[in-house]
Image (cartoon, rainbow, N blue to C red):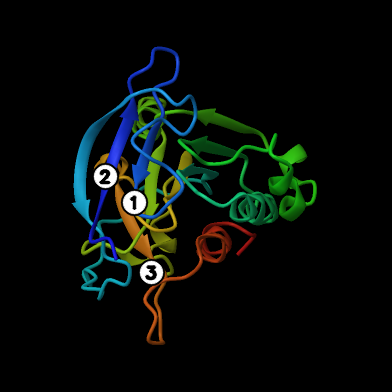
Amino acid sequence: MSTSYQIRQCQRQGCGLRYPLVEGQPYSEQCPRCRGSTRLILTRPLTREPAPTFAQQSSPALPQAAPPVLEALLDNIRSAWNVGAMFRSADGAGFTRLHLCGITPTPEIPAVGKTALGAELSLPWTWAADGVAAAQALLEQGCCLWALEQDPRAVSIYASKPDLPSGKLVLVVGNEVCGVDPGILELCQRVVHIPMLGAKRSLNAAVAFGIAAFALGGGG
C-alpha cells in the first residue's frame, strides 16, 4: 500500500494540468489529459484514515451582513459519478457555480449527467487545469475559501455556521484519496470538517460534499 502521494504538473504549453499521483491509480507521470511530460511539485505522506486532532477553539467571527453567495471548487475528483452527485447537491443547496479543476470530470462526460440528473445543465461551471491557480484567482476576486478536509486546524462545519462571511464563499473539496491539494489548503481562510461518531474518520466525497453544502446553504 502506498504511503505517500505526489502532486505533479504538466509541462506542455497550453495544458498545465495539476493532479495527484498515487501508486495503483490509472494515472502515471505522463499527463492524464495530454500525455505530456510532467514535473514533480511536492510529495506528501498519504494517510487514508487520519485520527483527528481538531482545533477546539472558536475562530474569530467574520462579518455577516448578508448570507454569502455559495460556490464550490472541486479539485481533482476522480469519479464522474461523484461529480454528478455534487452537481445535484450543489443545485439543491443553492450554490451558484462550480469550479472544476485538474482531473475532475466535466459535464461533457456522460457519466456526470447520469447522477446529476439535469443539475449540470442549470448550474454554471468552469474548468481549470491548475486548482491552485484557480483558487488564487478566486481570492483575488474577493472570495472567501473554506476547505472541507481532515486537518489539525479543522473546526466543525456546524460550529462555523454563525461565522459565515458576507460576499462569496467557496467550499473546496479535494481528491477522494489525497484530499485537498496542499497548495490550495494554504490559501483557505478556514478548514472545516464533519464530526464523525463511528470507527471511520471520513465519508465518500460526494456524501461529505452534500452534507457540507446543506450545512452552509440549503435554506437552513
**SS for callout 2:** strand
Question: Which residue is nearer to you in this view: 65 or 218?
Answer: 218
Of the residues tagged 3 and 1, which is closer to the observer?
1
- Under mark 2, the amino acid is Gln
Q: Position of residue 55 (x, y in %)?
A: 21, 68
Residue behind mark 2: 6
Q: Position of residue 53 (x, y in %)?
A: 21, 73
- Callout 2 environment at 10 Å: few (<14), some (14 to 19), or many (20+)? many
Q: Which mark is residue 84?
A: none
Q: Earlier in the sequence, mark 1 or mark 2?
A: 2
Q: Is residue 15 found left or right of 97 in the rendered image?
A: left
**SS for callout 1:** loop
- Under mark 1, the amino acid is Val
Q: Is residue 205 found left or right of 163 in the rendered image?
A: right
Quadrant of the image containing the C terminus: bottom right
Quadrant of the rendered image containing residue 27: top left
Mark 1–mark 2 contact, CB under 8 Å? yes
Residue behind mark 3: 159
